[in-house]
Amino acid sequence: MIQLIVRRLLLMIPLLFLISIVIFGIAKMQPGDAFTGSVTSTDSSASKYIEQQRKKLGYDQPIHVQYMKWAEKIAQGDLGESVRFKRPVLDLIKERMPNTITLGTLSLIFTYILAFPLGIISGRKPYSPLDYSIQIANYFLLALPSFVAGVFAIYLFAFQLNWFPFQGSVTIGLEEGTFPYYMSKIYHALLPALILGIMSTAGYVQFLRNDIIENSRKDYVRTARSNGISENKIYNKHILRNSVIPIVTFFGGDVLSIFGGAVITETIFSYPGIGKLLIEAISGKDYPLMMALLLFFAFLGLLANLISDITYSIVDPRIKSN
């Protein structure tokens, strides 16, 4: 296990290097920069100031020189300074990270709470009216765009019923670190987390249902039935345990989905997290912030695969990850 972790961590270094080249190239391929369109052609003093700022940031240098300087800073742990926010990128990430973690954690809780019971019920009663009802709901969720679900949720639960706030991450005026402050944090994250969790449920339900049906037809289940073991014990001890193993391995991917799925959700709900920060960086052509966040997402993707392999090795010792 230790060798697996060390080997995969070492492999991340060249992978992140190659990914950083792609990220830098994509960022620089965008037309203009953060200063484009900020002054008129007749405003000569402002134009000179903008040119000075571009030169200060090194935008006038060759692409390969810009990349080497950026990569050198990244290797030293310096993510640069946001052009738009005039603050260190690392400080912005630290500021927004707790909100995204709260949102993602709640969404995973909602996903598992809904997916496991529905998947088990659908798998144990296949082709029944209840199973068909769950399948119809699944197909509807798979076809429904997340932004449509988010807008509808805001209209119904925030504007019509007034159950939840429609933007922000905490009520203004609360003292940071107090119990009401943290409860307000959770309250503001509930509605976007619920939408994000429900939208992720369909895939889990479908996978668990199909795996339970497939395992119920295997020889070891027929043997258990012939030995007189009760159906409940067969499902709970044999079928369900084997069907849950692949679901558990999805946890690594869930780590990435916390951040990836939150990009759209945070934007719709005006929730100040990492996802919304990335959209703001892209729309404002804030290169230092945008490249740092994209590299951060790439690192999370590699880390998620490692967690998946480790989890799979733990829940099923017969599997040896390389």
Image (tube, rainbow, N blue to C red):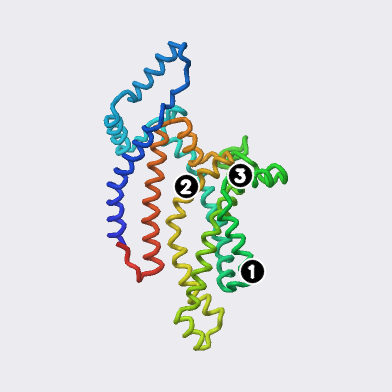
Front residue of this view, candidates 278 and 131: 131
Whichever of callouts 1 and 3 sits on the residue coming sooner in the sequence is: 1
* Neighbours of disc 3 within 10 Å: few (<14), some (14-19), many (20+): many
* Neighbours of disc 2 within 10 Å: few (<14), some (14-19), many (20+): some
Q: What element carries label 2?
A: helix
Say whether residue 143 is left or right of residue 37: right
Q: Residue at (41%, 18%) from the top-left corner?
A: 50
Q: Residue at (53%, 79%) from the top-left corner?
A: 233
Q: Where is residue 42 in the image (x, y as percent from the top left)?
A: 47, 11
Q: Position of residue 140 (x, y in %)?
A: 60, 56
- Considering every residue shown, the one lying at the far right of the view is 160
Q: Which mark is nearer the camera, 3 or 2?
A: 2
Reading the image, the residue beneath label 2 is 260
Using the numbered discs, state the Cα–Cα distance from disc 3 to disc 2 in whole angstroms. 19 Å
Q: What label does residue 255 carry, if any?
A: none
* Neighbours of disc 1 within 10 Å: few (<14), some (14-19), many (20+): some
Reading the image, the residue beneath label 3 is 188
Name the residue type under label 1.
Leu
Q: Residue at (52%, 85%) from the top-left corner?
A: 229
Front residue of this view, candidates 237 and 283: 283
Using the numbered discs, state the Cα–Cα distance from disc 1 to disc 3 in whole angstroms. 34 Å
- Is there CB contact under 8 Å for labels 1 and 3? no
Reading the image, the residue beneath label 1 is 130
Q: Where is residue 130 in the image (x, y as percent from the top left)?
A: 64, 69
Q: Which mark is nearer the camera, 1 or 2?
A: 1
Whichever of callouts 3 and 2 sits on the residue coming sooner in the sequence is: 3
Name the residue type under label 3.
His
